Each structure stands twice: as C-alpha cells, then as structure tokens.
Image (tube, helix red, strand yellow):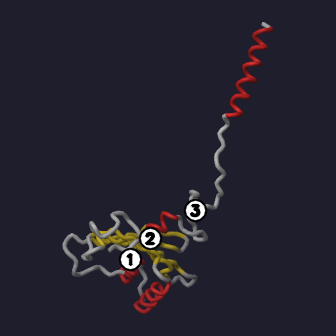
Amino acid sequence: MKNHGFAFVFLALATLTGCQDKKETLPATPINTPDSLTAPTDDKPETPAEVAEYRIISNSTIDDLNQRIAAKKITSEEEMMHEYSPKDKHAEANYKYVITKLSSGNGKTLVQLLEENLSDDSVKDRKVIMRVVKNSNGKSSVDEIKESYICRLDRGQQEWSASFCQ
C-alpha cells in the first residue's frame, strides 16, 4: 500500500509540472479597442463595420433639412424621411420605396428608407437611416442621417457600403 501512495504522489507531481509548461496564455486585449464587441452608445463612436457600411451625411445638409421641416410644419418621421429623399416619380415599375420605423424610445426614433432598383446607372439600391429626436418642447428634428449603397454590376460593390458607385 505504501508503494501505491508513493506512486500516486509521484504521478500527480509529474502531471502538474508537465502541465505548467503547456499553460496557454491569451494575448491581453484592451477593453476600449475598435475590435471590442461592445454595443455602440450615443457617447461612443460607431464600430468599424458601421463606419464602413454607412456614409454620414453632413451637418449642413441636416440643418437645411430641419429648416425645411420647420417651414412646412412636418411632424411625422416618415414625412421627414420623404422630405429628405422623395420618391422617384419617374422610376421604372420594379422600383421600390419603403419607409420603416425601426425603433423608438428615449425621445429618439430611427427611420429607414430602402430604395431598390433605382433609375441611376451606377447605384442599384440605397438605404438611408435617419435619427429623429424630440426636444424639451416636444418638437422633432433630425440629428443624424447615414446612407449605404449597393452598386450595379461592374459599377462597384455588391454589398451595402459607404463607398460611392462608379
């Protein structure tokens, strides 16, 4: 019995020392790197994937839009989107123009416009995301717009991207 106890202790020590050499170490990754998988908030920049997929529309364009919205007394988010990007009345029969309210809460609403089969010779489809916020007086205004494009064959990317088509 004494030999079995010695053999067990020897085997346990040999196993533990053998495993120490093979211990796997993972590289340390800082928490706030662009590759971290944290959900974007209003205070943080967008993830690289979102930046690559959407082109951010300039503040001057948004300011002009908000002036038109105020002048025309537009109150619905869908009408705001339509004011920014009206439906193409001269488009072909397979053209689609769909406005969808994606989410709403905390005084902010996301609205999406999806246009398919545009009559443009290089852009096939366009997606527009608009964020509408309510101020303390209850009036709505647009505070962010971003666009993404799919190009026609041989005119650029075939997946949603911020890049303009050629």
Q: Which residue is mark 3?
A: 34
Q: Are the residues tagged 3 and 2 within 8 Å (C-beta)?
A: no
Specify few, some or many for label 3: CA neighbours under 10 Å numbering under 14, 14-19, or 20 or more.
few
Select label 1 or label 2 by which is in front: 2
Sooner in the amino-acid sequence: mark 3 or mark 2 = 3
Looking at the rendered image, the quarter that the N terminus falls into is top right
Pick the front one: 134 or 142: 142
x 67%, y 37%: residue: 23
61 over 44 or under it: above or below: below
- Looking at the rendered structure, the kind of residue marked 3 is Pro
Counting from the top left corner in percent of width and height, residue 29 is at 64, 54
Residue 116: percent from left, percent from top: 29, 69
Q: Position of residue 14 (x, y in %)?
A: 73, 23
Q: What is the C-alpha distance between the residues marked 3 and 1?
A: 33 Å
Whether tag 1 and tag 2 are in contact, CB under 8 A, the answer is no
Counting residues from the start of the chain, the first of labels 3 and 1 encountered is 3
Mark 3 element type? loop
SS assignment at label 1: helix
Q: Nearer the viewer, residue 62 or 155?
A: 155
Q: In the figure, 36 relative to 51: above or below?
A: above
Give the residue drawn at x 73%, y 22%: 12
- Location of the C terminus by quadrant is bottom left
Q: Where does label 2 land, which residue?
A: 54
Rendered image quadrant of residue 96? bottom left
